[in-house]
Amino acid sequence: MLETTIAAIRPADEAAMAAARELHGRLTKPAGSLGLLEELSVRLAGLAGACPPPLPEPAAVAIFAGDHGVHAQGVSPWPQEVTGQMIGNFLAGGAVVNAFARQAGASVTVVDVGVATPLPTDPAAAPAGSDPAALDPAVTGPAVLDPAVPRLVVASVRRGTRDLTVTAALTRDEALAAVQTGIRIADELIDAGAGILLTGDMGIGNTTPAAALIAAFTGADPLDATGRGTGVDDPTYARKVAVVRAALARHTPDPADPLGVLAAVGGLEHAALAGLILGAAARRTPVLLDGVIAVSAALAAAAFAPAAVCAMVAGHRSAEPGATVALRHLGLDPLIDLGLRLGEGTGALLALPVVTGAVRVLHEVATFDSAGVAEK
């Protein structure tokens, strides 16, 4: 599946991009007056191979959740159980991502790709003697783009990664399984009608492997790639940087081998997000990146298929320093900068109207000729 997906990813359509630039020059506004939005709409035309490109709607958020063996190194003050508990909150509609998704009219799909604790809808968590078939059918049902009803997909590869300071976080087969899960979710959501995918994540301790991935793919020093995550104190932050440095020294991951990098120092949600991005790129569907977890996964996707960057839109600049390092490496400009560091897909959702507006201009704004407006 991975090889087929990579083979389907193509560079941007230059003719469509040229047509979009020419159209912008005829619209009733000074050339370049919409700044980055103009180039964004041109990029989306190149992705779609059409001018104007399709409106990026409806939107679908995919939140990949996983736990991390490196949590044992004290890199986060939060207990690991919070990952599973937050999935319950997502499904109940009580998280920030839910509030923002309702505002944007976006559907929410939560994917358990490696949570350490059993979930209420997981057969492993069912009471003894109960019938797993009686569990919530949302765990296996087809994608439904309903903003009012969050959906859970149970696709656990393993219950959390191994401690990357001791051994590889994943085997290559496990990393591949997670990547392919992301590809499948992208296909499901696009088949259900999604016009744009938004990345989401949940995993206590997941900014540590994100920092390791960013350092591995960009060559950045771990100090520059590592942030404070949920807001750790100075001793915890120093320990976190040391953990990332030690993991890179132990595994010496090769950025030319993205699957190997994901296996050595990544997380299951990072690998699945990389797959989601690749799946979207193969289907010529834009994917709106959230924060540092998403952009660390985007680096892996770009290492698998450089042309996948054509499908990526940077929703925001995370307060995590590694996010800026990764965005610079990818050549992406973030649409908003609000000092966010929550994850879940929240920053991507806030940026969604900006993306839609950029495309709507090409659909709805009159030209000088059609409006009878004199040009300069």
Image (cartoon, rainbow, N blue to C red):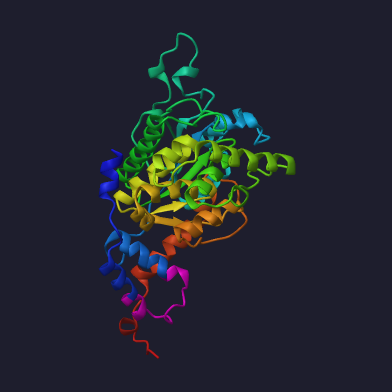
The residue located at (44%, 19%) in the rendering is 123
Residue located farthest toward the right when viewing the structure as drawn: 234
Quadrant the N terminus occupies: top left
Q: Is residue 109 visible?
A: no
* Number of residue marks: 0
Q: Is residue 18 visible?
A: yes
Residue 201: % across, % down: 51, 41
Q: Based on the picture, tell me whether residue 374 belongs to the magenta stretch.
A: no
Q: Is 22 or 246 nearer to us in this picture?
A: 246
Residue 335: % across, % down: 51, 62
Q: Is 293 or 72 nearer to us in this picture?
A: 72
Residue 277: % across, % down: 39, 47
Magenta extent: 22-38
Is 368 positioned to the left or the right of 161 in the image?
Answer: left
The residue located at (57%, 53%) in the rendering is 318
Quadrant the C terminus occupies: bottom left
Q: Based on the picture, tell me whether residue 28 belongs to the magenta stretch.
A: yes
Residue 86: image quadrant is: top right
Is 75 positioned to the left or the right of 357 in the image?
Answer: right
Residue 52: % across, % down: 31, 66
Residue 46, above or below 114 = below
Is 251 positioned to the left or the right of 57 in the image?
Answer: right
Is 329 positioned to the left or the right of 12 in the image?
Answer: right
Q: Is 231 or 347 nearer to us in this picture?
A: 231
